[in-house]
Amino acid sequence: MAPLLSITDLQVHFRTPRGVSRAVEGVSFDVNAGETLAIVGESGSGKSVTSMAVLRLLPTKTTRVSGSIRFEDRELLDLSEDEMRGIRGNAISMIFQEPMTALNPVLTIGSQIAEALMLHQGLGKRQALARGTEMLDLVGIPAAARRMSDYPHKLSGGMRQRVMIAMALACEPRLLIADEPTTALDVSIQAQILELMRSLKARTGAAVVIVTHDLGVVAEVADRVAVMYAGQKIEEASATQLFARPHHPYTSGLLRAMPRLGTSLHDPDWTLASIPGQVPSPFSRQEGCAFAPRCAKAKDVCRRHRPALRPAEDGHSHACHFPDNATGADHV
Amino acid sequence: MSDALLCVNDLKKRFVLGGGILGLGTTQEVDAVSGVSFTIAAGETLALVGESGCGKSTVGRCILRLETPTDGQVVLDGERIDDLSPETFRKLRKRIQVVFQDPFSSLNPRRKIRDILAEPLRNFGLVRTRAECDRKVAELLQIVGLSEDVAHRWPHEFSGGQRQRIGIARALASDPDLIVCDEAVSALDVSVKAQIVNLLKDIQKKTGTAFLFISHDLAIVENISHRVAVMYLGKLAEIAPREAILRRPRHPYTRALMSAVPIPDPAMRRTEPLLKGDVPSPIAPPSGCRFHTRCPFVEERCRTEVPELRPVAAGHLAACHLNDLADGENPLLSAPPVVA
Ligand SMILES: Nc1ncnc2c1ncn2[C@@H]1O[C@H](COP(=O)(O)OP(=O)(O)O)[C@@H](O)[C@H]1O
Ligand SMILES: Nc1ncnc2c1ncn2[C@@H]1O[C@H](COP(=O)(O)OP(=O)(O)O)[C@@H](O)[C@H]1O
Ligand code: SF4
Ligand SMILES: [Mg+2]
Ligand SMILES: [Mg+2]
């Protein structure tokens, strides 16, 4: 079966007063119907820009996008703005880290959900409101009918995120893109929202792309994971494979830097592993592997030749000259 | 405790909201902190954890005198500091420093790094000559792992992690006894977060500075703290040495907080039930035990009787009625450990 979404060699460059920002540099990945793909990486690695590119939400004047983004046999980069409007919030919808940026503060929750249903599903107002109430109920908002007439600011952060999810799922999208949906929330609320996303995915069968900097969140929800660093995808694998046998030293480093609650019980003197240095600037992408300046394994070849992304066993691909845990590592 | 560096006694802070000019209109009161007590020993790290809005920063700000407590005492080395005049407090200010969360707004963008670091050195009269100042600035930069030439650059030239190093250097300038770190690593990327946590631990080893480490992230807290205090809606739920908290939390909220931390292993699923609902509004906190609306163990008396924070084991205090039960009947003692 053809993938639901297929991104090939996506490049996104921004023109800025400081020069050209190479935010995304040749990223490719597929999302299959019904699966959850996590895009993980540190801030500035190009995760949000990649997901905004799919919905064509980037500023057109200053952005150069190239490559291909195919969704259900349509090339999204070739669609007119009108055609894109028919897709956004309908076949593909998106939720953001801060729901207030996406909710209209002067409209009630009810009218915002109903609007999307009337626009995309052609429902009448009364039907749309009824369906909206059902959706709020589905995402676990207590007294849903009453909440429909509330304004967004009356709700807590967790409740707003539930409303966003209800709105995003109202039109039964085939693809839901969630950009750091729990980053602004407390852990107890994060756990609730992740649980909600899991159960809704099982019910609706929508594919999910979840963008996050948090490997803990990845472990909780993802089937497959793409790791980004400095605008490139440097590794992709099933969640199980990635956590058990990371190939890219950056992925290994991130996993080691992740604290696991309870470690001190076995090792009271334990210190967190860190990765030295910092993420490179998007204005000065250097030759070779972008991670080389921070990588303990880097050799000359790493600084001179950018490693190509190569597939290893069962869909586990990586872009490293000297991968960790890999059988048949290539010798350069 | 006589050997305590800092002693916080029954600290209270109430904010009055609204009211408008002349006190017309309705006012509401928020008990951001309602009777919090703890001590910090010299060279110790006490972590203060809890979800947003529970009053952690307000506790820190009261200690730093950025807020005036409504009631209670803050005692440094046996001397009350909460009721000192601003002038007298200023002399003590160098002994308590702070590192905030946002490395982007906490450094003055119009001053070079050298001047940012020189300011506390001069204000507290710690250097006399320019040469002495330069030497001290270079030393501070070296302690936080930055090179000397950083002194001549501007804040905007640095990444979040590097700025946080500069913020730490500034806090260290006056050789303080205590640094309040308010979410000091929360905004940083994972790989950099680890660098800064390790830096703080190294600094403590070398200088013996104590930390009040305010954070919402238990997994990070575990790595840096000697003792942990858990706050919920303005009160302490529990306070204990790190190991005791991890092995056998004696408050259901601590249990819930621990089990909500994502496990970075796709093969593991949490077994503990999730906390339901949101944190109630601090404007009208629940009666009795403030956690009773979300507590999986709630009993009748929890709704009316406020549980006192009292000893449950050596150095371990908790505020939950379950601990009044005989050990064999206390579900907190028989439940499976949250982390193993
Ligand atoms: N509209 C824009 N104009 C210029 N640069 C941008 C714009 N949006 C994002 N960028 C830059 O693109 C890079 C990647 O950003 P982003 O995708 O937001 O990272 P993240 O992985 O944290 O989501 C960053 O360097 C960011 O500053
Ligand atoms: N200056 C203030 N005025 C009014 N309310 C405040 C003020 N500062 C904090 N609060 C309230 O006090 C409570 C505790 O806040 P805070 O100490 O910042 O919590 P935390 O740091 O744990 O997130 C919250 O309800 C917050 O809204
Ligand atoms: S006192 Fe009651 S409600 Fe409060 S934490 Fe203990 S069992 Fe739960
Ligand atoms: Mg982002
Ligand atoms: Mg705070």
Image (cartoon, coloured by chain):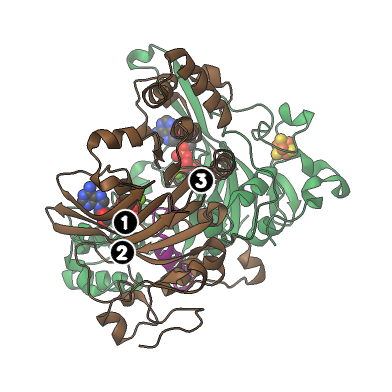
Splitting the image into four quadrants, where does ligand 3 fall? top right
Q: Which residue is mark 1?
A: A46
Q: Which mark is residue A230?
A: 2
- Element carrying mark 1: loop
Is label 3's Cβ within 8 Å of ligand 2? Answer: no
Amino acid type indicated by mark 1 = Gly
**Residue B202, above or below A60:** below
Q: Residue placed at 47% from the left, 60% from the top?
A: A225
The tint chain B carries is: green
- Residue B241 in which image quadrant: bottom right
Q: Which chain is brown?
A: A
Q: Which residue corresponds to the image point at 69% horizontal and 29% vertical from the top-left? A: B288
Q: Can the viewer see residue B14 in this picture?
A: no
Cα separation between marks 1 and 3: 46 Å
Q: Is residue B340 left or right of residue A128?
A: right
Question: Three-letter amino acid code at disc 3?
Answer: Val
SS label for mark 3: strand
> Mark 2: few, some, or many residues within 10 Å (few <14, many ≥20)?
many
- Asked whether disc 1 touches disc 2, contact meaning CB atoms under 8 Å apart, the reply is yes
Q: Nearer the viewer, residue A299 or B18?
A: A299
Please state, as top left, top right, bottom left or bottom right, where the C terminus of chain B lies in the image: bottom right
Magenta-colored span:
B181-206
- Residue type at mark 2: give it: Ala
For label 3, the residue is: B74
Is residue B205 one of those drawn in magenta? yes
What is the chief secondary structure element of the magenta stretch?
helix
